[in-house]
Amino acid sequence: MLQTRYPFLLVRTASWAVWALAAFSAVAWGLRGSVSPVTDALSPLAHTVAADVNLDAAARSLGAQPVAEVAAPSLASRFQLVGVLTGGPSQGAALIAVDGKPAKPVRVGAVVAEGLVLQSTQGRRANLGASLQSPAALTLELPVKK
């Protein structure tokens, strides 16, 4: 069995350790409560630093490539005339592909796309416009055979 020569020394050391732990805990809680005024004093500094950052330069330094703006496709590039069937001044039909989709048959007077109507067909050509009586807004022609 283990016997100590000075039992009061063990009690004193344990008591001192408990009181030191209690004092440390009180100081830690006291410092935690006093932190908020320091962060409020630093907040304006943090906002001014963030405002000076150049996002484009940061993106380039991380390897981002500049993005070229894509222009909206022109009206003529949206449509492709695939075939024409003529039948007179107010008759006829055309095979028209819109926005790269498969070609669909359209009769004279029918809507091709929003705001465009097939006005007439002549030979290897089709005229599109806002209505049957309005001037032609777009003339589509069949591609030349090779």
Image: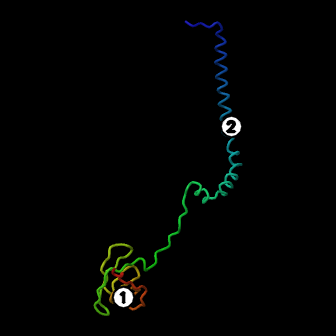
Asked if residue 29 is positioned above or below residue 38 in the image, the reply reads above
Say which mark, if any, is on residue 136: none
Q: Quadrant of residue 114?
A: bottom left
Q: Earlier in the sequence, mark 1 or mark 2?
A: 2
Residue projecting furthest to the front: 146
- Residues 15 and 144: in front is 144
The answer to whether marks 1 and 2 mark residues whose Cβ atoms lie closer than 8 Å is no
User: Residue 119 bears which disc, if any?
Assistant: 1
> In x, y percent, where is residue 68?
53, 67
Q: How many C-alpha atoms fall within 10 Å of the one at disc 2: few (<14), some, or many (≥20)? A: few
The amino acid beneath tag 2 is: Leu
Using residue 64 as the reference point, say whether residue 47 is left or right of it: right
Q: How far apart, in angstroms, are the residues tagged by discs 1 and 2?
A: 83 Å
Q: Hey, what amino acid is under mark 1? A: Gln
Residue 58: give x, y in percent of width and height: 60, 56
Q: How crowded is the residue under tag 1: few (<14 C-alpha within 10 Å), some, or many (20+)?
A: many
Decide if residue 139 is on the left or right side of residue 61. Answer: left
Query: Does residue 8 sit above or below 30 in this rendering?
Result: above
Q: Nearer the viewer, residue 108 or 10?
A: 108
- On screen, residue 117 above or below 57: below
User: Would you identify the image quadrant in which residue 138 lies?
Assistant: bottom left
* Quadrant holding the C terminus: bottom left
Which of the numbered marks, if any, corresponds to residue 31? Answer: 2
> Which residue lies at the image location 65% right of the left edge and 35% below the top edge?
29
Furthest-bottom residue in view?
Answer: 89
How many numbered circles are shown? 2
Q: Residue at x 57, y 54 (%)?
A: 62
Q: Secondary structure at mark 2?
A: helix
Element at badge 1? strand
Q: Nearer the viewer, residue 14 or 104?
A: 104
Residue in the picture at 65% in, 19% down: 15
Choose top left, top right, bottom left or bottom right for residue 143. Answer: bottom left
